[in-house]
Image: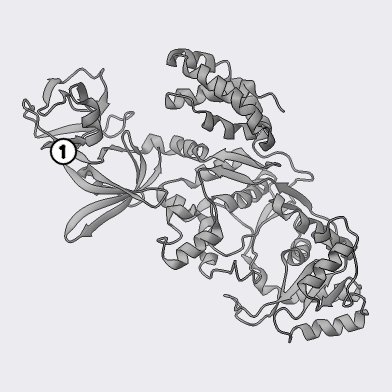
């Protein structure tokens, strides 16, 4: 196991500085980026817990002092293992491809692969092709007609520039048919009528089926007949070594029959290629030089190489990236598609989809997503990355321009016996700005939680004055700001915030939010950054809605 004690100490100190207390569960995911294997989790956890306890006993001032000694440790490891590592034969003539399957909107997971291809195309001053991988798919994972536009919008918003027009595989069926016929002429393809059970048994025993041994001219005839067969009656397979060490590689499917209607070409075609067949042809014909794809497609890559060798074509360089598990995020495009189509979700912008559209609506910047992916880089192994990494990047980008307002859950009205006779007050718009906004001062409300927590104690109403909380509050000071502070509201509007899990948090907000433009990101002080989603009217009563971005 890799010795990560220095990294653990560094991350524990950093976590404690940021949040007041280190949390062992927040340290573990970061270590996967520094060589930790999943099998070593049980071994390393006691060390994490031990170091976290030690760090939490250190004073805040001392933590910051010690952390300075460890920043180099983190930077050295992170710079070495993250980011855009060099690719073999990368250069200005490099051609990459982004190949989304249009079963739904892009989400944070699959957008990572497309962004990597784009970033490498930029790095080498090459070009990126956008290819809609819209072969027929499966009944369990069908093409969504709306996905074409959603994907295109996602690429545009993320700033992923691609060369030329979008290429649609559904327009290229005749090209695939041509090469299928060439494979048959080379005695490398055959039409099979065997059942799944027969195929499984033959694969296990390394035995050819009766369909495979028929001569080329018969195979060509059966191929033509396949276009009039029913679903499941015929499959075009490729001939491989029936003693190949991986049974799944033996005589894989190249074409199958489907009567499902295609969103773009209707029922014009019934015989559809598999992923490895269509890509083996297109990667050659489109001049792709570098392929970046997931580790889950390794056998497809091997099959592509096998087909390239049959045609004596040059191999593009293939790079397999490990799976990135984003801690705190559930990424299931097929499941989200069902919930969008059923009406359970409000659409692909629903925060529970984690789609690019939903992140945009929440106030996550496109530049933050790009930087997030760039920091992950081309990871060769499966890793876990906290969603807080994205939030941290986004926070740095939006914080300087995010105006501050108050939001209160379960507001409680204060009775203040010696309230100053102020009709309005000026409140700073941002701690780093001299700009202020005026708010009318009427009855003052604070949250029930703050009232119960500080009852009987002196507290400062943020940007206002100090009071001693009780059944009747009493103003104690106006200028002394060196005491605990809480939020308050006077001139307010009903507000609710849509959270990432689809639930709402209701309360009241400063009435100044009425003047915000839709999509404006602000900070509800001591709560979170949120995106303004607009004013609502229900039975004539006005309220406003926000979407939660992050803390």
The residue lying at 12 percent from left, 23 percent from top is: 475
Asked if residue 436 shows in the view, the reply is: no
Q: Callout 1: helix, strand or loop?
A: loop
Q: Can you say which quadrant of the picture contains the N terminus?
A: top right
Position in image of residue 88 (x %, y %): 78, 44
Q: Is residue 484 left or right of residue 390?
A: left
Image vertical order of residue 167 relative to residue 478, above or below: below
Image vertical order of residue 322 relative to residue 103, above or below: above
Which is more toward the observer, 370 or 276?
A: 276
Position in image of residue 389 (x %, y %): 52, 37
**Total marks in image:** 1
Mark 1 highlights which residue?
A: 490
Image vertical order of residue 73 relative to residue 282, above or below: above
Position in image of residue 382 (x %, y %): 66, 42
Q: Can you say which quadrant of the picture contains the C terminus?
A: top left
Position in image of residue 202 (x %, y %): 86, 68
Q: Is residue 362 left or right of residue 237?
A: left
Q: Is residue 526 left or right of residue 283?
A: left
Q: Is residue 14 left or right of residue 136?
A: left
The residue lying at 54 percent from left, 16 percent from top is: 68
Asked if residue 500 shows in the view, the reply is: yes
Which is more toward the observer, 497 or 392?
A: 497
The residue lying at 45 percent from left, 24 percent from top is: 21
Q: Would you call the spot at circle 1 few (<14 residues within 10 Å), some (14-19), or many (20 or more)?
A: many
The residue lying at 29 percent from left, 49 percent from top is: 496
């Amino acid at each position: 196991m890799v010795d990560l004690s220095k990294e653990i100490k560094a991350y524990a100190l950093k976590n404690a500085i940021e949040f007041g207390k280190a949390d062992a569960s927040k340290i573990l995911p970061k270590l996967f980026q520094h060589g930790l294997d999943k099998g070593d989790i049980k071994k390393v956890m006691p060390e994490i817990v031990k170091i976290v306890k030690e760090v939490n006993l250190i004073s805040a001032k001392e933590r910051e002092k010690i952390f300075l000694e460890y920043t180099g440790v983190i930077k050295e490891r992170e710079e070495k293992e993250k980011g855009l590592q060099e690719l073999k034969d990368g250069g200005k003539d490099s051609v990459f491809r982004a190949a989304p399957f249009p079963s739904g909107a892009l989400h944070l997971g699959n957008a990572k692969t497309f962004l990597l291809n784009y970033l490498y195309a930029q790095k080498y001053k090459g070009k990126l092709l956008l290819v809609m991988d819209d072969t027929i798919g499966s009944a369990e994972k069908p093409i969504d007609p709306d996905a074409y536009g959603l994907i295109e919008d996602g690429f545009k918003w993320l700033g992923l520039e691609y060369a030329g027009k979008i290429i649609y595989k559904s327009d290229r069926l005749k090209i695939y048919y041509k090469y299928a016929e060439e494979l048959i002429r080379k005695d490398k393809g055959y039409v099979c009528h065997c059942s799944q059970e027969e195929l499984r048994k033959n694969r296990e025993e390394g035995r050819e089926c009766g369909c495979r041994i028929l001569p080329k001219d018969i195979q060509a005839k059966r191929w033509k007949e396949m276009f009039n067969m029913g679903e499941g009656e015929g499959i075009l397979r490729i001939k491989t070594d029936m003693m190949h060490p991986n049974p799944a590689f033996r005589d894989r499917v190249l074409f199958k029959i489907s009567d499902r209607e295609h969103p773009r070409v209707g029922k014009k075609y019934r015989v559809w290629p598999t992923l490895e067949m269509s890509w083996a042809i297109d990667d050659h014909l489109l001049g792709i030089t570098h392929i970046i794809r997931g580790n889950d497609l390794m056998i497809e890559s091997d099959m592509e190489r096998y087909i390239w060798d049959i045609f004596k074509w040059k191999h593009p360089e293939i790079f397999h990236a490990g799976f990135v598990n984003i801690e705190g995020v559930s990424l299931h495009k097929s499941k989200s598609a069902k919930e969008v189509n059923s009406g359970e979700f409000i659409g692909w912008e629903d925060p529970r989809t984690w789609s690019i559209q939903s992140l945009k609506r929440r106030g996550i910047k496109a530049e933050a997503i790009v930087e997030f992916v760039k920091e992950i880089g081309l990871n060769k192994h499966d890793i876990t990355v906290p969603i807080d990494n994205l939030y941290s990047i986004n926070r740095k980008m939006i914080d300087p321009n995010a105006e501050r307002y108050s939001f209160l859950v379960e507001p409680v009205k204060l009775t203040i016996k010696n309230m100053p006779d102020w009709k309005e007050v000026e409140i700073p718009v941002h701690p780093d700005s001299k700009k202020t906004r005026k708010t009318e001062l009427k009855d003052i409300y604070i949250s029930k939680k703050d009232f119960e927590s500080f009852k009987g104690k002196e507290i400062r109403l943020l940007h206002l004055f100090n009071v001693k909380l009780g059944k009747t509050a009493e103003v104690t000071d106006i200028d002394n700001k060196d005491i605990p502070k809480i939020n308050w509201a006077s001139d307010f509007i009903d507000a609710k915030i849509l959270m990432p899990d689809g639930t709402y948090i209701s309360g009241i907000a400063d009435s100044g939010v009425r003047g915000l433009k839709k999509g404006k990101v602000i900070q509800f002080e001591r709560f979170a950054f949120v995106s303004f989603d607009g004013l609502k009217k229900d039975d004539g009563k006005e309220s406003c809605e926000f979407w939660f971005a992050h803390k």
